[in-house]
Amino acid sequence: MTTPEQVAARGTDGSEKKRRDPTPLFSRHILGMRVDATDYAGAIARICDLARAREGGRVCVATVHMVMEAYDDPQLQDQINRADLVTSDGMPLVWGLRALGLGHAERVYGPTLTPMLCAEAERAGLRVGFLGGSPETLAAMVDNLERDHPGLQIAFHHAPPFRPLTAEENDALALSIHDAEVDVLFVGLGCPKQERFMAEHSDTLSCVCVGVGAAFDFIAGHKRQAPGWLQRAGLEWLFRLLTEPARLWRRYLYHNPRFIWAFGLELWRSRKERSVGAPS
């Protein structure tokens, strides 16, 4: 039987890749999508190891939204399941991992991971790049990061158009990232666009790609983050829905109830099977 760790060590074509980080990675599948139990220190160490190896790599920062997009799209689910790391960005996924037996699972939140990883990249001399957001958002974020991390080597940043790229544009973009000799590429295209981009280019880019969703907007100061107590209570989605109802209503009002129902049923079945199989 294939373990989650073996899945994580495979390329997008199913072939075995050289294991670059021997640290055990404990995982569970939530509605068919792999989620790894880690913390900020563990995630940053793994990402930096991938960056130094210069063999590529993909990191997905998972939310309920991502789980449900993958639940509805088997191809996307397979792409995410083959990533090198899938962190639990949302508290519901942390609680899900703990309910499935991984009590040490912690939240690894994209807007927090990004500056922490930049600080480590500054210390380690790794070159970073940023792909996504609007030109204004990207410029403000880069200014803030350069102010806070004056030694950070920002080798690339690009705000692509909000439309599908042509084949020529796609190839030129990958070439630009390659020529910039980026070690860590932060991808802020939003889910599932960023996960598809990273999977598509996993065999052509030598940098590790980290999909961080809306982190660019928060670091740029263009969007407000939910208060800490709301985040810890798993209610960040409500804060974001109230601040951006027109854009986010479907994500939260459609996906969240489906997740609660489907994962609750999955968890109930799992516990029922364990109780039936337990020795009397």
Image: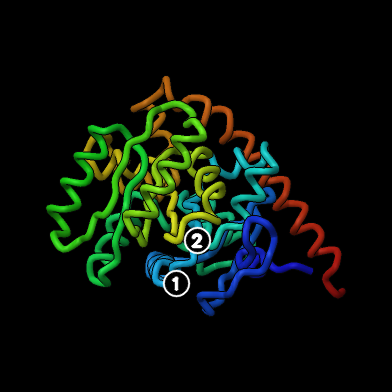
Amino acid type of the residue that numbered disc 1 sits on in the rendered structure: Ala
Q: Residue at x 73, y 51 (%)?
A: 268
Q: Residue at x 44, y 49 (%)?
A: 211
The image shows residue 28 at horizontal and vertical percentages of: 64, 61
Q: Residue at x 45, y 51 (%)?
A: 89
Q: Residue 57 shows which numbered tag?
A: 2
Q: Residue at x 12, y 53 (%)?
A: 147
Determine whether label 2 and label 1 are within 8 Å by CB.
yes
Q: Nearer the viewer, residue 3 or 136?
A: 136
Does 164 sit left or right of 32 as displayed? left
Which quadrant is home to the C terminus? bottom right
As displayed, is residue 69 above or below residue 89? Answer: above
The image shows residue 226 at horizontal and vertical percentages of: 32, 41
Q: Nearer the viewer, residue 240 or 15?
A: 15
Identify the residue under disc 1. Answer: 53
Q: How is the image coloured?
A: rainbow
Label 2 secondary element? loop
Does 186 sit left or right of 201 as displayed? left
The image shows residue 181 at horizontal and vertical percentages of: 34, 59
Mark 2 residue crowding within 10 angstroms, few (<14) / some (14–19) / many (20+): many
Within the image, what quadrant is residue 148 found in? bottom left
Which quadrant is home to the N terminus? bottom right
Label 1 secondary element? helix
Q: Nearer the viewer, residue 153 or 31?
A: 153
Q: Residue 187 shows which numbered tag?
A: none
As displayed, is residue 94 above or below residue 21? Answer: above
The image shows residue 244 at horizontal and vertical percentages of: 37, 26
Amino acid type of the residue that numbered disc 2 sits on in the rendered structure: Gly
Q: Nearer the viewer, residue 27 or 267?
A: 27
